[in-house]
Image (cartoon, rainbow, N blue to C red):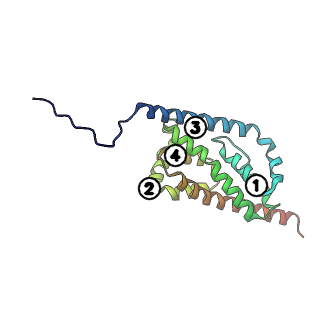
Amino acid sequence: MLAETNPPISGAKPKSKLSGWRLLLLRILTILVVIALSVYIYSIRDRAEEVAVYGYPGIFLLSFMAYATVLLPAPGVAIVFTMGGVFHPIGVALAAGAGAALGELSGYLAGFSGQAAIEKARLYEKFKSWMQKNGALTVLILSALPNPVFDLAGMVAGMLKMPVLKFLVFCWIGETIKMMVFAYAGSLSIEWLLPR
């Protein structure tokens, strides 16, 4: 008896091994870009105040740079607090929230490209469970709270392939809420220290 072979489905292309290599190369390049960006921003953190003289675009840029670092500290909310006493707090919050949300893409991209790097982290399973149940709400709440672990949450969102626009929108809402609190706190502290 001859073995019956199924003819290929018309229009279907056979999977190419090259596409797997392209994905691997993209993941490696993404990790390298995130690492390089983090190291560069960390190295210039002392000159951050110089950018703030450019107003809201400067605040956006500072916030982007502060939040684009992965697991390295940068002076994000401290600058928002200070600028809240100089500029209108709502404008500061909107500019800083947008910059922070875009900056958080570095963690998202690191997760998208480097799954094995964080699977061993203790918080990984907890964040993974939260993201699978309600990813958007998890991103919103964790980005609205000042905490050092949002990079890990962003990585988990990337690993789970949360749509990038969904991640950005809910991260922006959360970051803007957080920045609003810090900007108004800065505004009120300046008024308290320097009464009119």
Image coords of residue 52 (percent x, y): 81, 52
Does label 2 or label 1 sit earlier along the sequence?
1
Q: Residue at x 74, y 60 (%)?
A: 92
Label 3 crowd bin: few (<14), some (14–19), many (20+), radius 10 Å: some
Does label 3 or label 1 sit earlier along the sequence?
3
Q: Total label count?
A: 4
Q: Give the residue type at disc 2.
A: Lys
Q: Is there CB contact under 8 Å for labels 4 and 2? A: no
Residue under circle 1? Answer: 57
Residue under circle 4? Answer: 158
Does label 4 or label 2 sit earlier along the sequence?
2
Image coords of residue 59 (percent x, y): 76, 54
Does label 4 or label 1 sit earlier along the sequence?
1
Label 2 and label 1: CA atoms lie apart by 36 Å
Nearer the observer, 5 or 74: 5
Nearer the observer, 196 or 20: 20
Q: In this view, does 146 lie to the left or right of 12?
A: right
Residue that lies at the very extreme toward the left in this rendered image: 1
Nearer the observer, 23 or 176: 23
Q: Which of marks 2 and 1 is in front?
A: 1
Label 3 and label 1: CA atoms lie apart by 26 Å
